Amino acid sequence: MRKFSLLAVLLVWGLGALAGPAIFVTEPVFDFGKVKEGLLVVHKFILTNVGDATLHFTRQPGTSCGCTSAPLPKDSLAPGEFVPLLVKFETTGYGGLFAKKYVYVYSDDPATPTLTLVIQGNVLPAEPFEESAYTLKYRYRLILDVRDKDAFLRGHLLGAVNVPAAEIEKNSELPQCVIYVYDEAGETGVSVAETLRRQGFWAARALSGGLAGWAKEFGNYLMVGQAPETEPQLSPAAIPAARLAQEYVIILDFRDAESYKREHLWGAIHVGPEGLDELLPHLLPAAALTPELQPYIFCVDEGEGLAQEAAQFLQALGLTRAYALVGGLEQWRLRYGSEFMTTEP
C-alpha cells in the first residue's frame, strides 16, 4: 500500500504539479490493530503539498473527541514540502471496543479544504490489576511534610515528601497536582499552603491538625515511625484527615536503586526488586477497610513485569485498589515527559 501511494506521488510530479496548493497524505487511515487498554497509541501522518503554490493551514487540526491530539508544527508548506502530523489516541476507557477516531486538517487547498484522517483499531480490556498512566495522573496526590528533617525522620506519613517550610518559597519544582501539606500539629500548615497557592500550586491544601491530627483519628495507620504526642490544632481552613484517607495515593517503584535515583515520580517509595516484604506491615492494615476507604496503590517499573506481579499479590491480600501501571514508566514519559518526575532521593 505504501509503495503504491509513493508511486502515486511520483506520478503527480511526473505529470506536472497541480495548479494552486494541494494537500496529500500517503495513508489517510491508520489501523493500529489490537492494543491493551491504557496504552497510548501514537502515529505520524505525513502531509505533503503537491501543488505549485504555498499551502496554508487555516487553523489547527480538529478531532472527533478529546481523546485524540494532533498539534501542527507549522502553518504553511511550500510546493513539494511535507510536514509530520503527530496524532495520539488515549485508549483508557475504550477496553473491549473497536475505536475509530477522526482528525480534520484545514487548509486553503480549494479541492480539499478539510482533509479527514482516521486512526482506528481494537482496544483489548486491561487486567483487573492494571491502570493507565492517565488514571494515575488524574488521581495523583502529593503529601508534603513541611517540618524539619529530624521531625520527619522521627515519624511521617507513608510516601510523604519532606520539604521544610523555610525552603518552600525557593522550591518551584513541585508537581502541579493536589498537594496535602502537613506540619506537626497544625501550626503552620495553612500558611504554607497559602504560600504554595501564591506560587501557582492552586491545589495546595493543609491537613487539619497536621500529623497529630492524623494520628488522633487514625493512630499509626499509614505512618512510618512515631506519632506526635502534641494535641492537634484543628482549623476550618484546613482539610480533615478523613478526606486525605479517601484520596491517599501510594506509588511503589520496583526498579533498581540507580534507576530510581536517576529519576522517579514525586513521592514514589523505592521498593526495588525484593523490598515489598518490608513495606507490607505498613500496607496490610488497609486491607481491613472497605474498598472505598483503602489507599490507591500504583506499582511501577520501567515496563511490565514485576509491578504486575506485585499488584496481583497485593490485591490477593485484600488491597483492592492496588494496580500496576500499564506499559510502565515508559508510558508515563510518552504522555507527560518528565512531568511529576524528580531526581531527589
Image: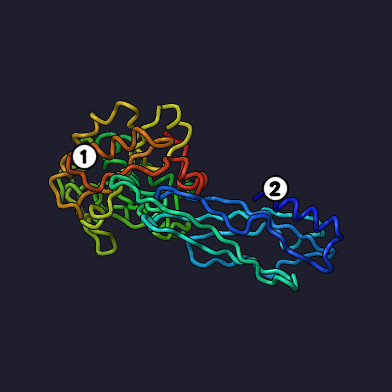
Residue type at the position of mark 2: Lys
Give the quadrant of residue 324: top left
Q: Nearer the viewer, residue 152 or 26?
A: 26
- What residue is drawn where x is 26% and y is 54%? 244
- What residue is drawn where x is 32% and y is 43%? 298
The residue to which callout 1 is attached is: 283
Q: Look at the picture and state if 275 lies above or below 137.
A: above
- What residue is drawn where x is 40% and y is 27%? 256
The residue to which callout 2 is attached is: 3
Q: Secondary structure at mark 2?
A: helix
Q: Secondary structure at mark 1?
A: helix
- What residue is drawn where x is 17% and y is 43%? 318
Residue 293 image offset from top left, x and y in percent: 19, 53
Residue 40 image offset from top left, x and y in percent: 48, 50
Badge 1 crowding class, 10 Å Cα cut-off, few under 14, some 14 to 19, many 20 or more, is many
Q: In the figure, is residue 74 to the left or right of 98?
A: right
Q: Look at the picture and state if 292 lies above or below 58.
A: above
Residue 291 image offset from top left, x and y in percent: 19, 52
Q: Nearer the viewer, residue 27 or 165?
A: 27
